Amino acid sequence: MSEEAPKYRRILLKLSGEALMGSAAYGIDPAVLSSLARELAGLKTLNVEVGLVVGGGNIFRGLAGVAQGFDRVRADQMGMLATVINAIALEEALKKHGVPARVFSAYEIKGVVAPVAREEVLALLDKGYFVIFAAGTGNPFFTTDTAATLRALEIRAQLMLKATKVDGVYSADPQKDPEARKYDYLSYEEVISRKLRVMDLTAIALARDNNLPILVFNVQVPGNIKRAVLGDKVGTLVGGERHG
């Protein structure tokens, strides 16, 4: 497909906090952040409307806190606050690359980030802003996978992109099993029945019930985000129309 005719006009990109770390063991790598923002800025030239959900695992992961003896609710709250830091960093990086961006958080932090307000979000998307959602759903026990699916449905995204470090979904861990097979397409039911680690079951069920296609792809390959939006054969598509 030509760059002038992207297949998807409005998307939701789900990023893990780890995607911002690069080779570091913790935190945000400025070079990685800038490179990601540059890739995303390419979507602006295609007039693609973009929502983003970012995790917080590079700073604090709720389940890791539970393993250290933290109360689950408080640990999850800490993890959600970590996503706010990542969201602000991503907002600033996008602005440096000429992309207007705004952070909305499930937790209101006055003077720092605004609370999620759907009508305002939709209005900004229509104006060409990239909208970044932070703090998950605002509730403990829910992953950022579920938050991404929820936000994708709220903004009426045509596709949810799940950024990973591998080039799609495999039948087994390709780093451990040389016989692992990559899938180009999966139905929601196949993901659930085969217990494939695409997203958590709550997120998959929510996407299935609302016919939201999910594309799992390697975000570390330059140009992959744009290829996905153009409808090129990238990664593994879950639900929706099969790759041509």
Image (cartoon, rainbow, N blue to C red):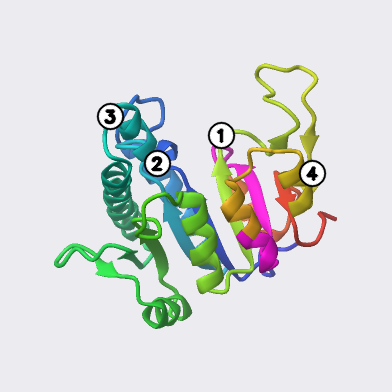
What residue is shown with label 2? 17
- In the picture, measured across the screen, residue 78 lies left or right of residue 151, that is left
Q: Residue furthest left?
A: 111
Distance Cα–Cα, label 4 vs label 2: 25 Å
Q: Callout 1, which amino acid?
A: Lys
Q: Callout 2, which amino acid?
A: Gly
Q: Which residues are magenta?
A: 206-222
Distance Cα–Cα, label 4 vs label 3: 40 Å
Residue 149: horizontal and vertical position, in percent? 54, 60
> Which circle, 3 or 1, is nearer the viewer?
3
Residue drawn at 63 percent across, 43 percent down: 198
In the depicted view, which residue is nearer to us: 238 or 52?
A: 238
Label 1 near label 3: C-beta < 8 Å? no
Q: Earlier in the sequence, mark 2 or mark 1?
A: 2
Secondary structure beneath dot 1 equals loop
**Vertical side of 116 occupied by 184: above or below:** above
On residue 165, the disc is: 1
- In the picture, measured across the screen, residue 37 lies left or right of residue 88, that is right
What residue is shown with label 3? 69
Q: Callout 4, which amino acid?
A: Asp
